[in-house]
Amino acid sequence: MRHTPAALMLFAAGNGTRMRPLTETVPKPLIEVAGKPLLAHAMDQVATMPNLRVVANAHYKADQIEAYFAGSDVVVNRESPDLLDTGGGLRNALPLLGDGPVFTMNTDAVWLGPSPLDCLARAWDPVRMDALLLGIPLDRAHGHAGHGDFSADPDGRAARGPGLIYSGVQILSTKELLEIEGSVFSLNALWDRLLVRQRVFIQPYPGQWCDVGRPENIAVAEAMLRGGDV
């Protein structure tokens, strides 16, 4: 089995409820920020790793997601009839992703700085880790309220609590996904198992990040990308 990630799961299946009314006509990953869809911003981060196998899940307005990736090497995995959430969606895509750890990436954020995938790849240590999350320091996060999702000890080992915001990007060992009951579940169910064994780590991101989960955050993201006031 591989010990370094050779595949990426793009989460693109959600209903986009918080982005209404924009998502009444397009799925959230195709909403434009700074003149291009969120999916294009996500794929910009993949460009530094051209040999990655990329799989995107799709459910809400899946035809539009499939049309966007038509002619590319990205494989679109439809979730039907039910939306499977992040954990169920990842497990459903495992036959396409292959064995070994994978990158996963949410598609509702934009980045200003180095590729988040590169940052994680350099820090990944499969001997100690089953999950390596990319975290955003509060002063580098835009469009996001709260005090963070995970703290980190001096070695980078993660625990739930204030500290770093989970960016939506990680490297994850998937072998325990098959042990979780039910078809619809969040990746939190897997993280909880790994946290007990102290196998979850978090790496701070050195650049800027913006959560584009609400319509009003589009302007915030565009200001960040311009390098202006946010």
Image (cartoon, grey):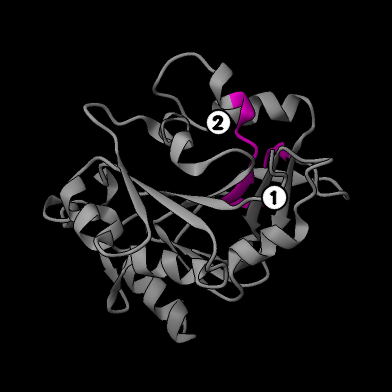
Question: What's under tag 1, amino acid-wise?
Answer: Thr
Q: Is residue 6 magenta?
A: no
Q: Position of residue 143 (x, y in %)?
A: 44, 62
**CB under 8 Å between callouts 2 and 1?**
no
Residue range of the region highlighted in magenta in the rendering: 159-176
Residue receiving disc 2: 188
Q: Residues within 10 Å of mark 2 (few under 14, many from 20)?
A: few
Residue receiving disc 1: 4
Position of 187 with respect to 19 (left or right) is right
Residue 13 - label? none
Report if residue 56 is visible in the image.
yes
Residue at 72% from the left image edge and 45% from the top image edge: 3
Residue at 62% from the left image edge and 72% from the top image edge: 207
Q: Position of residue 38 (x, y in %)?
A: 34, 64
Question: What's under tag 2, amino acid-wise?
Answer: Asn
Which residue sits furthest top? 181
Q: Position of residue 51 (x, y in %)?
A: 54, 64
Which residue sits furthest front? 1
Classify mark 1: helix, strand or loop. loop
Residue 92: image quadrant is top left
Say above or below: 85 vs 117. Answer: above
